Image (cartoon, rainbow, N blue to C red):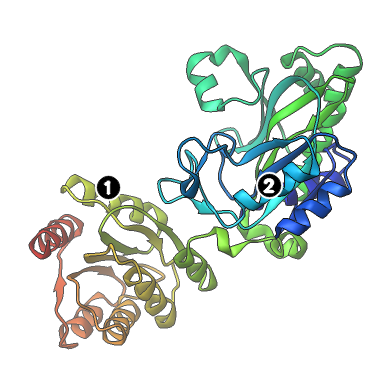
Amino acid sequence: MNIHEYQAKELLAKHGIPVPAGHAALSVDEAVAGAGKLPGPLYVVKAQIHAGGRGKGKFKELGQDAKGGVRLAKSVDEVRANAEEMLGKTLVTIQTGGEGKQVNRLYVTDGVDIAKEYYLALLVDRASGRVAMVVSTEGGMDIEQVAHDTPERITTITIDPVQGFQGHHGRALAFALKLTGELNKQAQALGKKLYEAFIALDCAMLEINPLVESKDGQLLVLDAKMSFDSNAMFRHPDVEALRDETEEDPAEVEASKYDLAYIKLDGDIGCMVNGAGLAMATMDIIKLNGAFPANFLDVGGGASKEKVTAAFKIILSDPAVKGILVNIFGGIMRCDIIADGIVAAAREVDLKVPLVVRLEGTNVEEGKRILADSGLAIVPANDLGDAAQKIVAAVKDVA
């Protein structure tokens, strides 16, 4: 689960982490009122969307010469003008794709006199089973570009969750950022607080870019991006309440209601599979046969008929889908349950695209019988390779 920048900063501030003062706004008047509560005379007006690259982005409606989604304002009147120009417009960044995202929220913050910018992020390093703190002196830049061009400027510090953040981790952080004196002490204290917030909130990722040194010698979190382990949100109802569903794909929101793992992709063959590994293999073999998957969808190991029906409807809600491949290996999941769900969904939505089904495992013969007796135009497949060839061929015939 992702949240907006202003929400991330509010959470960090509760953990004693220094952030510039700021106020969220859903309207122009709220943006102006927020600016009025700040000391000024410099303000920053930030578009709030779940995507990076806002400062370099462009608003569709304003043309290529328009300013991006992060703007400096030297007066409250300029805050108003920027808010009027940004709210309700579509911001296109390197992470949104060509469609962009509509800006429905703004964040008006106090301006900071910046002396130096740094990069700092905490991630779950699955290879080591530890939390990785990634730091660089090259803040404010795309970290991927820094990693490609100057990898020596990135330092990774791994932290054993059993032992937690130790003094040597803080010293390594300050050394990597080349900080001395009072700034060195601030960096060590900041690293400890960030790690504690990361663990306490069950974060999956916490990125600060940039972390800045102000000209009066303070380290401040100037921008923050946070994502959380969705499986842990039952422990954090206050964090879960921050979810902004308008920033998510409607199909993905619908899928989450049924505990389905669904991600929309750019292809035209819908996939319904049980198990993440099998889903990845299914998408790979579709591409191997010259087509592209329209989604990743894992119905899980013990889905009910209702869950399967919901999954089928979600796939078909994508207008790009020209055919569907169902690939089920019935271990915990019974093939007859899957078959019942497929038949029920196909009838309910009046299926008009080719459907290829590969079933194997528990109650497979009963599942195949249900599909065969349904009277629907369902194409059976003997194995995954056969299924992929059949759905690709059927979609090409439709095209």
Q: Is residue 102 visible?
A: yes
Q: Quadrant of the N terminus?
A: bottom right
Residue hosting label 1: 284
Foreground residue, 248 or 131? 248
Kind of residue at disc 2 = Ala
Q: Could you say which is closer to the camera, residue 122 or residue 247?
A: 247
On screen, residue 209 versus residue 249, left or right, reads right
Q: Quadrant of residue 175?
A: top right
From the top left corner, tell me how far across and down residue 180 is, in percent.
Answer: 85, 11
Q: Alpha-carbon neighbours of circle 1 within 10 Å: few (<14), some, or many (≥20)?
A: some
Q: Secondary structure at mark 1?
A: helix
Q: Judging from the image, what secondary structure is the residue with disc 2 in? A: helix
Residue 316 lies in what quarter of the image?
A: bottom left
Residue type, label 1: Asp
User: Is residue 6 shown above or below 397?
Assistant: above
Residue at (61, 49) in percent of width and height = 85
Residue 8 seen by the camera: no
Residue at figure coordinates x 81%, y 20% from the top left: 168
Q: Residues within 10 Å of mark 2 (few under 14, many from 20)?
A: some
Disc 2 vs disc 1: which is toward the camera?
2
Name the residue beneath numbered marker 2. Answer: 81
Distance (Cα) linking label 2 and label 1: 49 Å
Report the residue that reaches farthest toward the left: 397
In the image, 218 versus 44, the foreground residue is: 44
Seen at 15% across and 83% down, the residue is 372
* Horizontal relation, residue 191 to residue 232: left or right: right
